[in-house]
């Protein structure tokens, strides 16, 4: 099967690299809004304005643009011409995005799996599974330890801040309480800590910066927040990776009074590379659903796991069941 | 939708109780090989020899017999007449069992999902998912802490043993090594401990019992095994629950050298009640697949998670994605 990548940032580069681990998938071209000649890659770079010429030549387009402005346009547009897969992650806007992509994919006779990745994506799957198996219970999601782009951006907008990175950190005592089966009520503050590494501008008022961060509504005010000031060199050396992860737990009751705990967790050195790996596995499923004559938008909830693997159904039953 | 339960041991009772947590599922009857009048339950008890009279009246039969002798007969037999779901768990014989159930389910125009539960079942799903997303990596499964029926039976066959229970216990240091991403090579002995609680017969030679257990090939010889002698009362008081659980981990590499860890784990107070809860969720999926015109044997790999939940696709996208 052949695929194309649309958008060549961290995620697109991760997809390019993930495809090398999947010998049944061939990368045909990378589509970019930049001048394709200005971008160096091991793959043919093509201007996104020429993408229509690839209709019929690429089985699945892997959309690697951002959820704020790229995907809301590209998803509906490209699913008219191609089977697509994306990691649209604005939770609140998923129903609306699904409807748009569904109607354009149907009009083009294509299959589009939206909102893969890990949250939404693998975390959502585990929420659904655990809730279906344990209808009486509570669900808990913890994120981190990892870099939150939204919170890092918020720090960088503070006056006197030159650069900064924010880590979301689950509070281990809260995770352990859930694992113990005690079904705790946990406040926002009890679930996560926020740790900030900030590079201040020359002569900036560090106390004022700390105060502005810690009291920032929506982002930090409801949390215990720690602020460290470091140098630009230190930030580059120690905080340029993009780790992330988290835990989805469900604590349920069955029978007379049995506690049953289901947990799914991720510990990721590279958030974009992992999301990219999920996208590639779902691209395989998109291809197979399209081959089978399926049409329209789908989510991870509609895709049987067997379609994600290069192995045949017989091999899977023999080796993995 | 209406269901029946075939077999009324620990698992069948667990299913009866799980159905009470799922208001969209109605339990019609429980089928038993015993004299139905000798069994007390909150549901109509029917002799299994009369099961054919329920053809067309029950949407899905939930098969709760054992994998050694019950299911190899009942699976192929009943899938001619009914949609079925089971937790057949003899890993090595799954391909053969699948083929038999597939041909009889097709001949009857029914859908049969085999080998649900947690291993095979939810653990298998997580092995497949993690391998598809992280093709370069290693998979590790740890079982426990939990009661192994096979090992408990083996203890009880030792001369001088009146009763006994065996716990399989994952070695925490091995689990932590895997979580660290170091991709360790782990021997059988390094992965699990075996702890035995034994009630000896009056005057039995306890050293001889201990020695026979610890050196028993296949069951204990390759492990560090601890043997405790306790009284029958103590066994009943402290060891009559059937806890289990375990962890499926995959430690993979992406990009230049990023370590990515995916973990799924269960901590179960009651192994049969949890397996029963999984069976009931998959019974819902069987019903829906049959409604959609699907036929033949399926495994958990063929069932999209969306079919497990009583919620509609729209609700799932809005609430859980």
Image (cartoon, coloured by chain):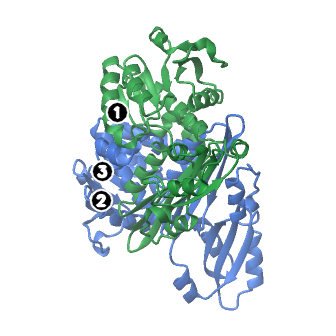
Chain colours: A green, B blue
Residue found 71% across the figure and 78% down from its top: B227
Read off the chain for label 1.
A
Question: Label 2, on which residue?
Answer: B22
* Residue B312 coordinates in the image, percent (x, y): 28, 45
* Residue A131 coordinates in the image, percent (x, y): 39, 56
* Residue A243 coordinates in the image, percent (x, y): 62, 46
Using the image, tell me which numbered label, if any, was put on residue B310. Answer: 3
Read off the chain for label 3.
B
Residue found 72% across the figure and 75% down from its top: B226
Residue found 31% across the figure and 28% down from its top: A100
Furthest toward the bottom, the residue is B203
* Residue B11 coordinates in the image, percent (x, y): 42, 64
State which quadrant residue A80 falls in.
top left
Question: Label 1, on which residue?
Answer: A97
Q: Are marks 1 and 3 in contact (CB under 8 Å)?
A: no
Q: Depth check: B102 or B126 in front?
A: B126
Q: Is residue B78 visible?
A: no
Q: Are marks 3 and 2 in contact (CB under 8 Å)?
A: yes
Q: Depth check: A189 or B239 in front?
A: A189
Q: Is residue B54 above or below residue B21?
A: above
Q: Residues within 10 Å of mark 1 (few under 14, many from 20)?
A: many
């Amino acid at each position: 099967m052949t695929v194309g990548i649309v958008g060549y940032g961290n995620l697109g580069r991760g997809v390019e690299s993930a495809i090398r681990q999947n010998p049944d998938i061939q990368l045909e071209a990378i589509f970019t809004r930049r001048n394709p000649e200005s971008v160096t890659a091991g793959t043919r770079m093509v201007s996104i304005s020429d993408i229509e010429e690839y209709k019929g030549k690429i089985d699945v387009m892997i959309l690697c643009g951002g959820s704020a402005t790229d995907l809301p346009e590209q998803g509906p547009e490209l699913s008219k011409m191609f089977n697509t897969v994306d990691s649209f992650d604005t939770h609140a806007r998923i129903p609306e995005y699904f409807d748009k992509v569904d109607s354009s994919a149907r009009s083009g006779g294509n299959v589009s799996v939206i909102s893969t990745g890990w949250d939404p994506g693998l975390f959502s799957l585990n929420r659904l599974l655990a809730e279906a198996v344990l209808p009486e219970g509570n669900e808990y999601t913890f994120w981190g330890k990892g870099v939150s782009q939204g919170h890092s951006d918020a720090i960088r907008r503070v006056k006197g801040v030159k650069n900064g990175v924010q880590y979301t950190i689950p509070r281990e005592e809260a995770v352990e309480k859930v694992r113990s089966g005690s079904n705790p009520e946990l406040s926002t503050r009890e679930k996560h800590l926020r740790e900030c590494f900030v590079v201040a501008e020359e002569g900036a008022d560090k106390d004022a910066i700390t105060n502005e961060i810690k009291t920032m509504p929506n982002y930090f005010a409801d949390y215990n927040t720690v602020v460290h000031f470091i140098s630009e060199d230190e930030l580059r050396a120690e905080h340029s990776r993009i780790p992330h992860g988290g835990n989805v737990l469900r604590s349920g009751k069955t029978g007379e009074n049995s506690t049953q705990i289901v947990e799914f967790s991720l510990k990721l050195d590279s958030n974009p590379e992992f999301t990219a790996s999920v996208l590639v596995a779902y691209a395989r499923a998109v291809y197979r659903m399209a081959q089978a004559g399926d049409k329209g938008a789908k989510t991870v909830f509609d895709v049987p796991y067997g379609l994600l693997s290069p192995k045949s159904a017989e091999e899977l039953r023999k080796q993995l069941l």
